[in-house]
Amino acid sequence: MEMNPNEVPNKNIITDAKPKRSKKSGEKLTTYAGLTNETQFSKNQQTSMKNNKDNLITSPNTVTKFSVLHQNIRGLLNKSEELIISLFPDSPQILCLTEHHLKHFEIENIRMDHYNLGAKFCRETHKSGGVSIFVHDTLQYTNIKLDEFCKEQDIEACAIKIHLSSLTIGIICIYRSPTGNFVHFLYTLDSILNFVYNHTTEIIICGDFNINFLNDNDKKRELYNLLLSFDLYSTVNFPTRIHNNSSSAIDNIFIDKIKYEDYSIHPVVNGLSDHDAQLITINNITVNKHNKKPQYIRKFNEPSLSQFAVNLSYENWDNVFIEEDINTVFINFLNTYIRIFNASFPLQKTYNTHFNKPWITPGIKTSYQHKRTLYLISRSSDNLKLKAHYKSYCLILAKVITAAKQLYYNSNISKSINKQKTTWDIIKTETGKNQSNKGIQSISIEGNLINNQQLIANGFNTYFLTVVGNITSNLKNDKTSVQYNNPVNYLYKNFKLPCPDMKTNYTTPREIEKIIQSLKAKNSHGYDGIPTKILKISTPFITSPLTYICNKSLSSGIFPSRSKFSEIIPVHKKGNRMDITNFRPISLLTSFSKILEKVIYARLYQHIDQNNILATEQFGFRNNSSTEKASFHLINEVLLEINNKLAVGGLFCDLEKAYDSVNHDILLSKCEFYGFRSKTNALIRS
């Protein structure tokens, strides 16, 4: 007997058993590993926060209901912002969009605040079409590859599995063209459902099926019978497409109504296409809600900056100048500076509103609402003037939004100290490539999926510390590798005698001032929480103690221990984001460490330059040299040989972990040959 999928069957009815499904495996990413544990560094100072989103301290998670939105968007380009605005503040966890009309590279550059592109299908041959799924950034998900099942127009599909604490849900997004082969559609959909059931525990399927579910017809019955075999039932009982005096429901969302009978569904009219969106909320499924995150920031405004300068001017740094031990000297200086810094810029609690479109003014939001009102009136009217007015209003609103965004970005660039960086940040934001703040929620370590944040941080630390050792040990065990003598012996082929001792000249307050001013004004900082922007403001008040510290380090041959602490940030470089080997470490040192490094560098470089230690072919890391000069030199040499009618060949090498793999003992022994002896060698060693 045929059953109406809109009716929930009696729970005593025995349905066919579902195939067994595999366990979940998560996706998504960000963490950082801090490497500081100094007992003299107060707890308040250890939790110094960045003036951005990197260090959000979240309150206990509240719970919200799981919701999915589907809409035939009829072209996603230039609609993503309005879509997010229409859903704010109660944003669903999943956005399933059909007919996005985009190519692969286009949809990958679509930026949706707080959503990640989870899965997609794009047409290669025909125009338009395509399906996509966007996942809220608070959820862990894995893409389910369905490309082998898809055929343009007949069935276009993509799928993901969502990893919740209690279960795994498979989300399938489907589009079927009105001209597609319906028999092939049903056959392939059956294969897709069986395939997805092998990867997940529950299924929600939504899309534009181009079957009017408000009428009784053969295609509807055949589709219902197929979905019933997987315990999936129709939930949409309202029109999803209204035009003039006609209405139809060709979009639908199917769920297991037996298990999830407590649900609600309603249309969302946003005027983005001639299809209304459908938003389903399943009350039986709950997820953690991260809408309002307490954020602790320091506000650097004119009053606080002025107070900071005044507080620094009162400090005489007696606890710095009376000490002889370089480590004690540096600790006293840093603790005093941080105490003044914390007093002048106290941490203030604020909340992330999860909506970051500063150019969307209240007036523009009102215009959006008026646009939706016009849409509702015009779509049910035959008045051509009214329809023309609606189209004209949409074009004007789009121009207003573009102008508002342009004005906002121009203002940011004009106010920026580093205009080039600000410009690139805007480009990355608009192209969806600014993903530096994405968190690493899970990672694969030696084949095991890790979700615990502390274990993830420990895993990154272990990998970064051992990866170089593994490379060098493999080279030592390689029987085909050439065994070399003492590398210092090769230096005598180019130098008859070792270089003279390097002269260690003390630094001056003037040199320290120039070094500080040469630092780039950034908001980034090390474990001390002090950005270079603030350091540059405090230059007149700290040059004397910093001069004393640098000279103490040069004379003692010791680099202060606390200046070697750093925050290690894992940055994705290529390939699968779940694989820990595809990340590289970025080390954020304290700004004071950079000053001492530049003092040492200036003396090392002067000695190297005076003794002609570097070869003329060395272009990198030298004054008055660049990659452009290296390229010109190479091209010039090649052209000269070609003009001489000689064959030209090239051998290019890319060394894995080249800088990290440098043998420190060999480097230090070569440094001694070059004249970096005694305390200078000890300083480099420390």
Image (spheres, rainbow, N blue to C red):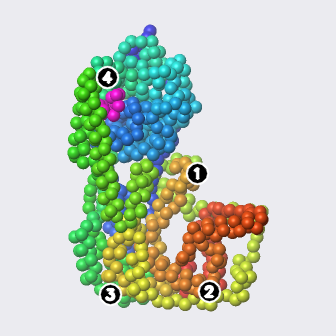
Q: Nearer the viewer, mark 2 or mark 1?
A: 2
- Viewer-closest of 531 and 127: 127
User: Of the residues under marks 1 and 4, which one precedes in the sequence?
Assistant: 4
Q: Where is residue 600 in the image (x, y as percent from the top left)?
A: 50, 81
Which residue occupies 39% across, 77% down?
A: 517
Q: Residue 446 carries which label?
A: 1
Q: Work out whether residue 667 can be spotted.
A: yes
Secondary structure category for the residue under label 2: loop
Magenta span covers which residues?
Answer: 268-283
Residue type marked 3: Asp
Give the CA separation, mark 4 to mark 3. Answer: 81 Å
Secondary-structure class at tag 3: helix
Q: Which three-letter amino acid code belongs to the residue tagged 1?
A: Glu
For the residue pair 38 and 430, the one nearer the viewer reads as 430
According to the picture, the residue beneath numbered tag 3 turns out to be: 318
Residue furthest top in the image:
1
The correct choice, above or below, for 145 with respect to 219 in the image is below
Q: Which of marks 4 and 3 is in front?
A: 4
Task: Tell which tag, 1 or 3, sits nearer the viewer.
Answer: 3
User: Three-letter amino acid code at disc 4?
Assistant: His
Query: Mark 2 highlights which residue?
Result: 611
Q: In which quarter of the image is residue 684?
A: bottom right
Q: Indicate whether 350 appears above or below 239.
A: below
Q: Mark 4 points at which residue?
A: 243
Q: Which of 434 and 9 is in front in this view?
A: 434
Q: How crowded is mark 2: few (under 14 residues within 10 Å), some or many (20 or more)?
A: some
For the residues marked 3 and 2, what is the alpha-carbon distance in whole angstroms? 41 Å
Q: Residue at x 39, y 12 (%)?
A: 216
